[in-house]
C-alpha cells in the first residue's frame, strides 16, 4: 500500500467516525416536532405542574420580563396550554423587528409519560414581532416556527408586560 493510500484511508476513516458520532449525538439530543406536538396536545393541569416565563437572556434589552415568573395556578396553566394546543406552522421572516423575547418552560409531573428526551420539561422560545407571535421549539433539528396570537395576550398579562421596546 502506498503512502497516499494510507493517508486517504486514514482521512476517510476519521471523517466517517466523526460523521457517525455527530449523527448519533444529534439523534440522542433532539426531539422531533411531532413528539413535541403530541406532548403539548396530551398535556393538561394534571400532568403540567408549573409553567415558567424566563428571560431570554439576562443582558437582552427586549426580554418580556426581567425576572422569572412561575405559574402554578391551575386556571392560568390551563389557559396557556389551551393556546399552545392551537399552534400553527408559520415561517418567521428573517430581519423582522422583534418587540420581546422569552422562554416558556412547561414542567411535567414525574408520572407523566411522554416521548421527550428530557421527560421533566419542555422549553419553548417565544418572541413577538411585527409579523406576530412566534414559537420556536427547542431541541429540534432543523428550524420550524409556529404562531399563536391567542397566546400573546395571555402571556403578556401574566408577565405584566406593558409596552413594546422594540429591537
Image (tube, rainbow, N blue to C red):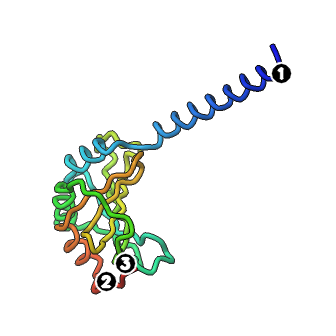
Which quadrant of the structure image shows residue 8? top right
Q: Residues within 10 Å of mark 3 (few under 14, many from 20)?
A: many
| Residue 138 position (above or below residue 68) | above
Q: Secondary structure at mark 1?
A: helix
Q: Work out whether mark 2 precedes mark 1 in sequence or the reverse, and give the earlier one.
A: 1
**At x 83% / y 21%, what residue is drawn?**
3
Packing grade of label 1 (10 A; few <14, some 14-19, many >=20) is few
Q: Which residue has dot 1 on it?
A: 3
> Between 89 and 100, which is closer to the camera in this rendering?
89
3 vs 1, front mark: 1
Whether label 3 touches label 1, CB < 8 Å: no
Give whichever of discs 2 and 3 has the lower sequence position. Answer: 3
In space, the residues marked 3 and 1 are separated at their CA atoms by 62 Å
Residue 48 location (% of width, % of height) = 27, 55
Of labels 3 and 1, earlier in sequence is: 1
Query: Which residue is more in the foreground, 118 or 20?
Result: 20
Q: Secondary structure at mark 3?
A: loop
Which labelled disc corresponds to residue 65? 3
Mark 2 vs mark 3, foreground winner is 2
- Give x and y (percent) for residue 52: 34, 66
Q: Position of residue 14 (x, y in %)?
A: 68, 30
Residue under pointer 2: 164
Q: Position of residue 60 (x, y in %)?
A: 47, 76
Q: Can you say which quadrant of the picture contains the C terminus?
A: bottom left
Amino acid at each position: 500500500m502506498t503512502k497516499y493510500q494510507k493517508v486517504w484511508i486514514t482521512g476517510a476513516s476519521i471523517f466517517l467516525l466523526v460523521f457517525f458520532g455527530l449523527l448519533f449525538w444529534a439523534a440522542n439530543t433532539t426531539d422531533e416536532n411531532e413528539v413535541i406536538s403530541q406532548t403539548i396536545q396530551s398535556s393538561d393541569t394534571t400532568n403540567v405542574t408549573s409553567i415558567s416565563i424566563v428571560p431570554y437572556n439576562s443582558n437582552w434589552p427586549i426580554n418580556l420580563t426581567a425576572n422569572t415568573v412561575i405559574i402554578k395556578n391551575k386556571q392560568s396553566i390551563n389557559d396557556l396550554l389551551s393556546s399552545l394546543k392551537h399552534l400553527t406552522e408559520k415561517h418567521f421572516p428573517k430581519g423582522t423587528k422583534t418587540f420581546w423575547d422569552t422562554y416558556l418552560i412547561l414542567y411535567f409531573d414525574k408520572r407523566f409519560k411522554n416521548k421527550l428526551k428530557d421527560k421533566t420539561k419542555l422549553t419553548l422560545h417565544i418572541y413577538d414581532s411585527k409579523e406576530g407571535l412566534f414559537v420556536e421549539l427547542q431541541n429540534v433539528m432543523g428550524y420550524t416556527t409556529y404562531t399563536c396570537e391567542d397566546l400573546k395576550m395571555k402571556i403578556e398579562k401574566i408577565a405584566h408586560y406593558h409596552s413594546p421596546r422594540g429591537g
